[in-house]
Image (tube, grey):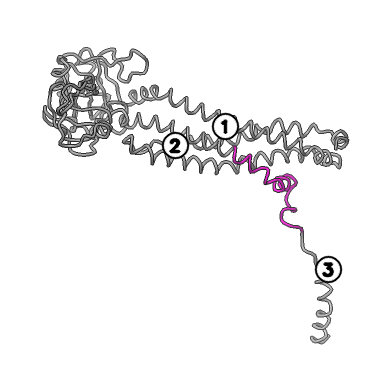
């Protein structure tokens, strides 16, 4: 057949083929029944997504703050170069329960010299805690003195790596010098070069900083005044005593054995044990924050369950019709489960975004005020656990609505309609 005849025949058939072509069904109608039902009711699901997302955001924020509480308290103990802490025999280095006390090391000057002379000790210094009165400078001599928490330092703390944190100025070197914490500097409006009178002793402020491992983190140590231990003893009338010794060692285990064997009347705590005690101290606050967060998640799960139960009640006629025409129970169950899964999955990024925004605001508002890097410090493992808990709670919330959907009787529902 000639080529022209072939093309003429094709041209005659083309209009008929185009006329019989019909567009396919929309994308939504090609999806499974459960997906189509959830997409059709997306407006009613927005409220559930917002509620669950807000609850997850609160939980993630509180968990991040709880992790931050422990981080703030343990930061100084983990970041410093101190390997061993020496306290009086029977004393508790970190007071956890009422009545816990580190005690006082007697004949502290000799003990400190003895510890420094042991093989493997790279550096050591001691501290003494006490309360001092600050006399008001100027013409108002009749003003009531204020009490301030002070820490006397025996030895050069700068010989231990990362034991001293300075914000301004330098660390103290003489008996008439003092270093103040950032909180003291801010609240009392003091700066480097000012003179303060503590217990009738005039001291020059040479720096704004703190000593790691004293005052339970940056928040606590920011409210302290650091001065020479001999000066503090003269102010409070104490003898040759110290509260604690800080030791930097080459081999902490070997040095610990030497101290326990050669020095009488003391106990030695290594860094791991110190962090464990800090964990006990922070456990109460952490448990409270996480409990509040879990309660928020439970409330969100109850909210989702109630909304799904209401959804099933409103769709009794639809479910009855589906069952009457032979739709299996697994498809009916898929309608409820699809909504629960969709709500939960959509709420996860919303909750995470709310927690990040809230945590960023907390850090921007309070971190500098507390003289710390971050207050909100979420651990990646904790965040993953919370998100997993959110998915599980969403599925559990659909249990009762799912049971109600499978118990709908077609005849009764259609008769009610």
The answer, for residue 399, to whether it is visible in the render is yes
Q: Give the alpha-carbon distance from disc 1 to disc 2, as whole Å.
A: 17 Å
Tell which circle, 1 or 2, labels the residue nearer the N-terminal end.
1
Q: Give the alpha-carbon distance from disc 2 to disc 3, as whole Å.
A: 61 Å
Q: Main secondary structure of the magenta part?
A: helix
Depth order, front residue of 287/5: 287
What label sits on residue 20 in the rendered view? 3
Q: Residue 261: say if magenta.
A: no
Residue 106: % across, % down = 18, 13
Q: Residue at x 27, y 24 (%)?
A: 253
- The stretch of residues the image draws in magenta is 25-51
Against 352, residue 111 (above or below) is above
Name the element at disc 1. helix
Location of residue 274 by image quarter:
top left
The residue that disc 1 covers is 297
What label sits on residue 378 in the rendered view? 2
Residue 342: % across, % down = 64, 43
Against 202, residue 413 (above or below) is below
The answer, for residue 118, to whether it is visible in the render is no
300 displayed left or right of 141: right
Tell which circle, 3 or 1, labels the residue nearer the N-terminal end.
3
Q: Residue at x 77, y 60 (%)?
A: 24
Location of residue 125 by image quarter:
top left
Look at discs 1 and 2 and give the one toward the viewer.
Answer: 1
Q: Residue 26: say if magenta.
A: yes
What label sits on residue 396 in the rendered view? none
Name the element at disc 3. helix
């Amino acid at each position: 057949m000639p080529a022209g005849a072939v093309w003429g025949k094709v041209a005659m058939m083309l209009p008929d083929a185009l006329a019989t072509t019909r567009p396919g069904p929309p994308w939504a109608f090609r999806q499974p029944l459960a997906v189509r039902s959830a997409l059709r009711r997306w407006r009613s699901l927005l409220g559930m997504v917002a509620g669950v997302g807000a609850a997850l955001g609160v939980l993630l924020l509180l968990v991040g703050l709880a992790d931050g509480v422990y981080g703030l308290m343990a930061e100084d103990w983990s970041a410093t170069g101190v390997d061993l802490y020496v306290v009086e025999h029977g004393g508790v280095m970190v007071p956890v329960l009422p009545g816990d006390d580190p005690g006082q090391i007697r004949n502290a000057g000799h003990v400190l010299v003895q510890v420094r002379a042991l093989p493997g000790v790279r550096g050591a210094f001691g501290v003494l805690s006490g309360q001092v009165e600050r006399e008001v400078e100027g013409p108002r001599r009749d003003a009531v003195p204020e009490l301030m928490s002070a820490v006397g330092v025996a030895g050069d703390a700068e010989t231990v790596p990362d034991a001293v944190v300075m914000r301004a100025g330098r660390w103290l070197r003489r008996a008439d010098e003092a270093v103040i914490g950032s909180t003291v500097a801010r609240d009392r409006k003091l700066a480097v070069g000012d003179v303060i009178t503590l217990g009738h002793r005039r001291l020059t402020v040479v720096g704004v900083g703190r000593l790691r491992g004293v005052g339970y983190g940056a928040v606590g140590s920011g409210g302290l005044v650091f001065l020479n231990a001999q000066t503090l003893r003269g102010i409070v009338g104490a003898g040759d005593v110290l509260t604690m010794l800080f030791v930097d060692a080459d081999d902490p285990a070997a040095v610990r054995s030497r101290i326990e064997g050669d020095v009488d009347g003391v106990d030695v705590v290594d860094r791991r044990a110190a962090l464990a005690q800090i964990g006990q101290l922070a456990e109460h606050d952490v448990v409270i924050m996480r409990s509040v967060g879990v309660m928020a998640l439970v409330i969100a799960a109850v909210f989702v369950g109630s909304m799904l139960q209401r959804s099933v009640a409103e769709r009794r006629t639809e479910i009855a019709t589906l069952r009457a025409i032979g739709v299996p129970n697994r498809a009916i169950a898929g309608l409820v489960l699809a909504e629960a899964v969709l709500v939960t999955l959509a709420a996860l990024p919303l909750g995470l975004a709310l927690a990040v925004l809230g945590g960023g605001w907390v850090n921007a508002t309070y971190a500098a005020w507390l003289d710390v890097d971050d207050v909100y410090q979420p651990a990646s493992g904790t965040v993953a656990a919370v998100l997993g808990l959110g998915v599980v709670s969403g599925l559990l919330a659909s249990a009762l609505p799912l049971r109600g959907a499978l118990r709908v009787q077609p005849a009764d529902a259609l008769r009610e309609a």
